[in-house]
Image (cartoon, helix red, strand yellow):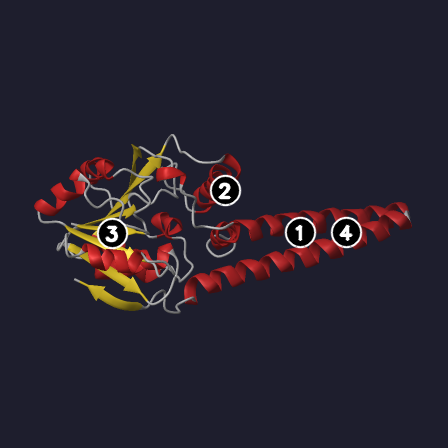
């Protein structure tokens, strides 16, 4: 099994991780290319922890892209992902592995009692989960928890079919994965440390779900346009029959607006589907793999 960790190394020294290492499993840290001293600290830590492997990216391609790099390098039967900010507890990993024995392709952690501010963390998470679930239904509550277990085959398929900005939980149902879920603990960031994700980063992540992975918003626009077109057509007919010209003019305007709105929704849906199919630019570039 390979454990993939992004964004830091606070978990090093955990007795749970040490136990996995003693059992012959690999631990790989994905340095996502942030302009801080994380990479240097990790490389220095290899002197004390020779089992530590590091994938160093050329620049910050984002957390998901860093994860794809880990998926592509993954060996063994199972892959477990864990965020290095210590909000998820490594001690919950055995829960996921136990659930995997029931034959699932992916087992997701569920932050049942999620910590963090409501407006900047919980509310965007609720909206993103709702959008993903409505477009690609799977029986889980939390698409955003990074503590997950995958079969190696599932990890490879997710990396191959995802685009550079892809939000791969959307693909769980689209690729026909059997998905399970277990409740995991969630903690505040150690020492009150603030998230490195700005409001603009959160907006970009949200829009990658809203615009780049689901067609639901544009289908909603199409429904509005078709409804307006139907009402406008009915108004024109009633206006002609009753010789109420003002009603006919209003109906004609509403119908034209509905037609243009419907066409806009259709074009948007087409562009999303095209982006989903052909967005194949490189997701990441590796500077060096320390192993």
- For label 4, the SS is helix
- For marks 3 and 2, give the CA distance: 25 Å
- For the residue carrying disc 4, how many other residues have a C-alpha within 10 Å: few (<14), some (14-19), or many (20+)? many
Residue lying farthest to the top in this orientation: 113
Q: Mark 2 against mark 1, which lies toward the viewer?
A: 2
Residue 254, numbered label: 4
Residue lying farthest to the left in this orientation: 23
- For marks 3 and 1, give the CA distance: 46 Å
Q: Residue at x 33, y 45 (%)?
A: 85
- For marks 4 and 3, give the CA distance: 54 Å
Q: Where does residue 267 sit, x and y in percent of width and height?
A: 58, 62
Q: Cβ–Cβ below 8 Å for labels 2 and 1? A: no
- For the residue carrying disc 3, how many other residues have a C-alpha within 10 Å: few (<14), some (14-19), or many (20+)? many
Between disc 3 and disc 2, whose residue precedes? 3
- For label 1, the SS is helix
Between disc 4 and disc 3, whose residue precedes? 3
Between disc 1 and disc 4, whose residue precedes? 1
Residue 288, numbered label: none
Q: Where does residue 182 sit, x and y in percent of width and height?
A: 29, 34
Q: Which residue is mark 2?
A: 124
Q: Residue at x 47, y 52 (%)?
A: 205
Q: Mark 4 against mark 3, which lies toward the viewer?
A: 3
Side (left or right) of 44 relative to 122:
left
Q: Mark 3 against mark 1, which lies toward the viewer?
A: 3
Side (left or right) of 120 relative to 64:
right
Q: Residue at x 80, y 54 (%)?
A: 252
- For marks 1 and 4, give the CA distance: 9 Å
Q: Which residue is mark 3?
A: 4
Q: Which residue is mark 1?
A: 225
Q: Where does residue 82 sit, x and y in percent of width and height?
A: 28, 46
């Amino acid at each position: 099994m390979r454990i993939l960790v992004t964004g830091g190394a606070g978990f090093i020294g955990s007795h749970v991780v040490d136990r996995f290492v003693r059992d012959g499993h690999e631990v790989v840290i994905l340095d996502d290319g942030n302009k801080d001293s994380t990479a240097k600290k990790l490389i220095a830590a290899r002197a004390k922890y020779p089992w530590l492997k590091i994938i160093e990216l050329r620049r910050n391609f984002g957390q998901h892209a860093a994860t794809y790099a880990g998926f592509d390098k993954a060996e063994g039967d199972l892959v477990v992902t864990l965020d290095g900010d210590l909000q998820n507890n490594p001690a919950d990993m055995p829960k996921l592995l136990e659930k995997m024995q029931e034959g699932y392709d992916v087992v997701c952690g569920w932050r049942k009692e999620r910590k963090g501010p409501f407006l900047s963390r919980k509310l965007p998470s609720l909206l993103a989960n709702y959008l993903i679930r409505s477009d690609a239904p799977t029986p889980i509550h939390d698409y955003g928890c990074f503590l997950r277990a995958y079969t190696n085959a599932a990890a490879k398929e997710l990396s191959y079919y995802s685009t550079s900005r892809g939000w791969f939980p959307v693909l769980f149902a689209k690729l026909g994965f059997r998905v399970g879920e277990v409740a995991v603990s969630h903690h505040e960031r150690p020492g009150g440390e603030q998230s490195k994700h700005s409001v603009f980063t959160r907006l970009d992540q949200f829009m990658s779900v809203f615009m780049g992975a689901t067609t639901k918003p544009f289908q909603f626009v199409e429904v509005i346009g078709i409804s307006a077109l139907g009402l406008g057509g009915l108004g024109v007919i009633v206006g002609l029959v009753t010789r109420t010209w003002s009603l006919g003019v209003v109906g004609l305007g509403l119908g034209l607006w509905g037609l243009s709105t419907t066409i806009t929704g259709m074009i948007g849906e087409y562009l999303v589907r095209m982006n989903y199919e052909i967005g194949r630019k490189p997701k990441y570039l590796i500077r060096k793999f320390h192993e």
